[in-house]
């Protein structure tokens, strides 16, 4: 027996009022030839109790990140989310609202998003932020198409964008999907042997529509050279920077070294890794890009009596008005998760953000030291500075090493051979604010044992 | 008005954290080191809990009242779903964990793929797209690669009816297609003659919402599919209105090749303030090679295997192969939304069609109540709205045109929408579809009672009987009065001005 339907069992009086005698008659407009006559071949309905029991059993089968030392990040954070965040964000009014098309009864969510925009703007050092994209990858992809719309008319390479070669391949794939249809040629921006950007080669991007780089890059490296990238590519090319949002507690925000658009994964603020979603993409830009940017934006306004109010603004960029000429097809976004992000950021405050970033920096450095003191283990990029992640090269197969560490109860990181075939002897190790001394010892022990075994 | 930036407590006191595990020296190169911290608020938990409670009280959700926002299927969000996604077996999972560590999650993905295939008559499903619009984009990308693989790259046009959601032309356009918009027929349905003259050797696809945004079932859908297929094009089903037809018909039977579902509409995933969504797509076999990668798959357990989830199968991520379009989201979609939708689906199981039955019943009942006021009520009403489309029966939603009212006393659709806020309702979808003048689009969903519908109809009649001046100046009882959207667009105050970056 199903529930959740208040009129169940009361259909006859309603049908009678409509002059009908059966539910089937409601569907009389569906032509015979497309009608489904047999019942859906699915199991019987369950009660809440049964669903909860199955959910506990099935999700309980999963091995979650907090149940063992875990060193996997790769663009998501095994973060600690303050208890207040999910409790407040799932208040029914927030949880069950939708796009605030009627600002008069949506002031709370609109103000919360305007505050979110301000905090993101402060974080990255650019004046404008939207209320979220789907994730870091779609933010990066739509930043590039946005930059092309703004820059192509005056660009000497009007159909070109340059992408750092140290962007994770799954993100590159998203970028390719979003750019292939609108006539953008993607070129690779090479890095030097030591992992830093090749500023000399970057000069060839001058006159293109956009350059996309990440700080830290896919291997966790903080690259000082990026601060000189603006000079290398000139003023007319859009500089788009993907960031680890938490790193900006200690790392200079790209807005202050010439970035036009900053994107990134918002997830570390607000929600657990959640098997990859729902998460949210950050998107902030300078004024030049405002009217060509994707996504929803909240503006301050006044009501008919002159008091302060908030409303969605610049909607004429959007699909429900502009249709095929819209700046993006995005409609549903990730507002509820961005709300969680705003709550988390507000609770941290400026000093809390810096401390969180220092905790991650500290656990990264400590883990790096422990792991690289194992004979036979090398840093892929020696003598660089890392945030959250770093890559090691081991004497043998990363896959086998991770399998061995898994048997020892340690989730040791990501097999970089999954991303780049030439790196099947490399592991990307991710750290976070929850990484403990005991976790690091367990990782170093497990890895050390495998390396010792492998080199015997 | 106070904002979160008014909280300015002592630095670093709002919320405490453990110290760094090791007091490593800060070896970040000086040039890279952040000089000025962001000007965020300095607030404590007690202050923030009150701040956000206050904001929530100025936000209207389904929990607050009737939310008849057409096309958005604003049904009740069962609370057990929220309880489930707080479990560490979903909240604390990384998408790159080995299959052996996420058998439970994979089995839920697999079950959802199968269920959506069954309900839609499609052969393969991916749960990767994270919103309806992204589902549209993904499916059109698959169709694009399909044509390319057949040497038919010259097909560069996508046909869209004028009643379509804006996302349809926007998604196809992002893939590089030109849009051919065809007008609706007089009865609001697909115009077969217009379609015949629009199709040709350059047709890549047609995108159709069925039932349409007018709440009408496209009775000639099979013929439309035949016409498009004969021209070599593909048929794409926008699943925005899937709530109307589950178990009664399906896009496969109607001749569609690809479809997207909105788990945040049909399957109740909450999307507070505008998202998250989840927009899986289903396709027929000939398109399945092009789906984004990977999808959940399974094989029978063999000797030596671990026990898995106990159903005799081993689950794994299966990569789609070389013809795949790759990724549209960097992981495996909005897993949290998938798990909520799974919990919702389990409530109905084989009786999912009850959902559609009561959604369609409620829609027809409400339309009937609004359009047929009792004689004493009718006598007070200044002017009745017109039907958005003439039809004996509608599906899960219907449209009204306030044009006659506007002509008579100047009260617009927007005025009525704003006045409904005073009566404690969310406004219906306003001025969409654009082909209906002064349109209100109303979708009650199956989770509203007869009493709510009766009351809404009565209040609607009350508004039509009120002094037009009161209606035109509405709302009167909301936290703020009518908001000036032009002022916002002219002044563009997009962030708190008092915290301008010190850089």
Image: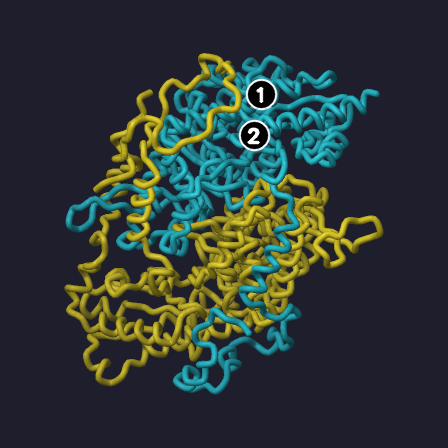
- Tell me the colour chain A is drawn in: cyan
Q: At which x and y percent is residue A103?
A: 29, 52
Chain the render paints yellow: B
The residue indicated by pointer 2 is: A435
Image spot of residue B453 (x, y percent): 35, 73
Location of mark 1 (residue) = A366
Say which quadrant the C terminus of chain B sits in: top left
- Determine the chain carrying the residue at label 2: A
**Helix, strand, or loop for circle 2?**
loop
Few, some or many C-alpha atoms within 10 Å of disc 2 (few <14, some 14-19, many ≥20)?
A: many
Q: Residue, x 56% and y 36% (percent of image)?
A: A175
Residue drawn at (76%, 23%) of the image: A451
Callout 1: chain: A
**Which image quarter: residue A363?**
top right
Q: How far across and how far down the image is residue A167, in percent?
A: 58, 29
| Disc 2 to disc 1: CB gap under 8 Å | yes
Q: Is residue B107 above or below residue A150?
A: below
The structure residue drawn at horizontal position 42% and vertical position 61%, both measured from the top left corner, is B74
Tell me where residue A108 appears, x and y as whole percent.
Answer: 30, 48
């Amino acid at each position: 027996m199903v529930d959740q339907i208040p009129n169940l069992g009361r259909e006859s009086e309603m049908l009678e009022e409509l002059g009908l005698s059966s539910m089937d008659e409601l569907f009389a407009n569906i032509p015979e030839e497309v009608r489904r006559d047999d019942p859906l071949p699915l199991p019987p309905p369950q009660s809440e109790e049964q669903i909860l029991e199955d959910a506990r059993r099935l999700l309980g089968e999963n091995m979650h990140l907090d149940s063992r030392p875990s060193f996997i990040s790769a663009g998501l954070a095994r973060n600690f989310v303050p208890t207040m965040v999910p409790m407040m964000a799932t208040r029914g009014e927030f949880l069950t609202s939708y796009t605030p098309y009627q600002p008069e009864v949506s002031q709370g969510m609109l103000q919360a998003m305007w505050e979110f925009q301000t905090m993101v703007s402060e974080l990255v050092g650019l004046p404008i932020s939207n209320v979220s994209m789907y994730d870091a990858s779609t933010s990066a992809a739509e930043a590039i198409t946005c930059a092309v719309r703004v820059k192509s008319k005056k660009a000497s390479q009007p159909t070109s964008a340059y992408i750092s070669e140290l962007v994770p391949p799954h993100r590159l794939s998203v970028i390719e999907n979003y750019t292939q249809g609108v006539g953008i040629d993607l070129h690779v921006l090479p890095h030097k042997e030591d992992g830093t950007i090749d500023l000399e080669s970057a000069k060839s991007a001058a006159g293109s529509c956009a350059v996309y780089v990440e700080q830290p890059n896919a291997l966790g490296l903080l690259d000082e050279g990026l601060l000189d990238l603006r000079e290398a590519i000139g003023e007319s090319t859009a500089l788009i920077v993907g960031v680890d949002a938490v790193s900006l507690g200690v790392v200079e925000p790209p807005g202050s070294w010439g970035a036009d658009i900053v994107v990134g994964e918002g997830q570390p603020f607000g929600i657990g890794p959640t098997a990859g979603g729902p998460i949210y993409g950050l998107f902030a830009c300078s004024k030049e890009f405002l009217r060509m940017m994707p996504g929803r934006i909240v503006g301050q306004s006044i009501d008919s009596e002159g008091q302060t109010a908030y409303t969605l603004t610049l909607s004429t960029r959007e699909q429900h008005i502009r249709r095929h000429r819209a700046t993006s097809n995005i409609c549903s976004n990730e507002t509820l998760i961005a709300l969680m992000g705003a709550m988390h950021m507000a609770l941290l405050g400026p000093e809390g953000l810096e401390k969180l970033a220092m905790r991650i920096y500290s656990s990264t450095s400590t883990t790096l030291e422990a792991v690289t003191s194992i004979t036979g283990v090398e840093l892929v990029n020696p003598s660089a500075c890392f945030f959250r992640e770093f890559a090691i090269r081991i004497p043998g197969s990363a896959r086998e090493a991770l399998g061995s560490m898994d048997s020892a109860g340690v989730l040791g990181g990501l097999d970089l051979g999954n991303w780049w075939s030439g790196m099947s002897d490399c592991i990307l190790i991710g750290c976070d604010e929850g990484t403990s001394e005991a976790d690091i010892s367990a990782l170093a022990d497990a890895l050390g044992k495998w390396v010792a075994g492998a080199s015997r | 008005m106070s904002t979160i930036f008014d909280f300015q407590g002592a630095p670093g006191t709002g919320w405490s954290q453990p110290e760094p595990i090791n007091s490593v020296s800060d070896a970040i190169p000086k040039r890279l080191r952040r000089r000025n911290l962001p000007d965020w608020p300095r607030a404590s938990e007690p202050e923030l809990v009150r701040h956000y409670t206050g904001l929530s009280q100025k936000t209207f959700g389904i929990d607050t009242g009737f939310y008849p926002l057409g096309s958005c299927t604003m049904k009740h969000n069962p609370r057990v779903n929220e309880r489930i996604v707080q479990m560490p077996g979903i909240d604390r999972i990384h998408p790159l964990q080995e299959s052996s560590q996420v058998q439970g999650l994979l089995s839920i993905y697999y079950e959802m793929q199968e269920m959506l295939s069954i309900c839609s008559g499609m052969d393969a499903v991916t749960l990767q797209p994270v919103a309806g619009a992204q589902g549209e984009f993904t499916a059109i990308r698959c169709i694009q690669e399909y044509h390319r693989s057949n040497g038919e790259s010259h097909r560069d046009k996508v046909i869209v009816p004028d009643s379509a959601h804006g996302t349809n032309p926007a998604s196809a356009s992002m893939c590089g297609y030109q849009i051919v918009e065809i007008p609706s027929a007089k009865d609001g349905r697909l115009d077969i003659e217009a379609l015949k003259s629009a199709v040709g050797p350059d047709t890549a696809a047609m995108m159709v919402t069925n039932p349409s945004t007018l709440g009408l079932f496209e009775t000639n859908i099979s013929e439309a599919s035949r016409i498009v297929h004969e021209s070599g094009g593909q048929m794409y089903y926008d699943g925005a209105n899937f709530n109307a037809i589950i178990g009664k018909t399906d896009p496969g039977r109607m001749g569609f090749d690809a479809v997207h579902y909105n788990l945040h509409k049909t399957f109740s995933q909450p999307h507070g303030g505008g998202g998250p969504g989840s927009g899986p797509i289903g396709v027929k076999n000939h398109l399945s090679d092009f789906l984004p990668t990977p999808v959940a798959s399974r094989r029978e357990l063999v000797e030596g295997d671990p026990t898995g989830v106990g159903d005799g199968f081993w689950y794994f991520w299966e990569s789609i192969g070389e013809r795949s379009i790759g990724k549209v989201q960097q992981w495996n979609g909005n897993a949290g939304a998938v798990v909520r939708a799974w919990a919702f689906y389990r409530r109905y199981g084989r009786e999912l069609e009850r959902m559609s039955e009561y959604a369609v019943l409620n829609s027809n009942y409400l339309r009937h109540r609004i359009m047929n006021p009792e004689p004493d009520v009718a006598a007070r009403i200044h002017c009745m709205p017109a039907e958005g489309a003439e039809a004996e029966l509608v599906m899960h939603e219907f449209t009204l045109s306030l044009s006659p009212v506007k002509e008579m006393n100047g009260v617009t659709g927007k005025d009525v929408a704003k006045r409904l806020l005073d009566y404690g309702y969310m406004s219906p979808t306003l001025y969409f579809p654009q082909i209906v003048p002064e349109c209100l689009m109303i979708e009650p969903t199956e989770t509203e009672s007869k009493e709510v519908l009766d009351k809404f109809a009565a209040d609607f009649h009350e508004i039509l009987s009120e002094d037009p001046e009161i209606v035109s100046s509405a709302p009167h009882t909301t936290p703020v009065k009518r908001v000036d959207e032009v002022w916002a667009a002219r002044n563009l105050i997009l962030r708190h001005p008092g915290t301008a970056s010190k850089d």
